[in-house]
Amino acid sequence: QIQLEQSGTEVKKPGASVTVSCKASGYTFTNYAISWFRQAPGQGLEWMGWASGYSSHTNYAQKFRGRVTLTTDVSTDTAYMELRSLRFDDTAVYYCARDLSGSYYFGFWFDPWGQGTLVTVSS
Amino acid sequence: DIVMTQTPLSLSVSPGQPASISCRSSQSLLHSDGKTYLYWYLQKSGQSPQLLIYEVSKRFSGVPDRFSGSGSGTDFTLKISRVEAEDVGVYYCMQSKQLPVTFAGGTKVEIK
């Protein structure tokens, strides 16, 4: 069974950093990239970026460039999303998802998704 | 960025009745490789999104055949031929013709 298991709820103060992990199982991790998304309370879905499952290649949404780092660890089949300089409006559920496309720049499509990690930014 | 827009915002449907959701993109989703990169997801309450339709009209594995997608260029439609109770949730269309990947705001489907 193909699964992505994310780390648990985080509460952070403004200005801090958060790292969310996403452990893959049930498939060959290096064959697929992982994308990250977020969903603010009651809002829609926002794509943050993409990280290759076998190389250091990444692609970030302009909005998050410079503040987010996506990495993958092939030794543990785990992807990571680090978001820095947290603001109140970063409060959201963060999702990872496997990218089925095999592409670097277009045609991404996603299945499955992790269960989501709630990150709350609060003073 | 490609802007995605969905209508209606919400839909209340009696069980067994059809439902239709429209999705429009700010530019054509037809790529130079000949494919159209338009997808449909369903997010049930408290759950992660799940893939229903890829490349406009292809049903993903395990998706019931009451779901169908159609359209081209900038206008797309998701149809549910006979809505069932398990179909409630928020439906999103998504484009990945170019980065960033973008989603429409969603259509909430509920049962009357």
Image: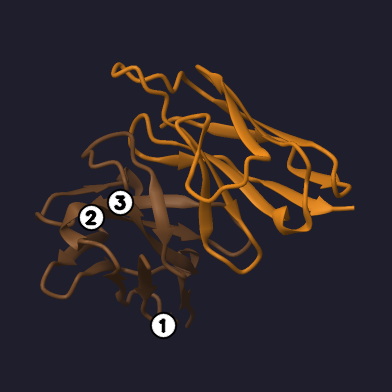
Q: Residue at x 50, y 17 (%)?
A: B73
Q: Tell me the residue that label 1 is attached to.
A: A8
Q: Colour of chain B?
A: orange
Q: Residue at x 73, y 42 (%)?
A: B9
| Marked residue chain, label 1 | A
**What percent of the width, then of the height, locates residue A34?**
28, 56
- Residue at the spot of label 3: A49
The amino acid pointed to by label 1 is Gly
Mark 2 sits on what residue? A66
Q: Residue at x 32, y 46 (%)?
A: A100
Which of the two discs, 1 and 2, labels the residue nearer the N terminus? 1
Where residue A121 appears, x then y in whole percent? 46, 76
Q: Secondary structure at mark 3?
A: strand
* Residue type pointed to by label 3: Gly
Residue positioned 33% across, 34% down in the render:
A107
- In the picture, the quarter occupied by the N terminus of chain B is top left
Q: Quadrant of residue B32?
A: top left
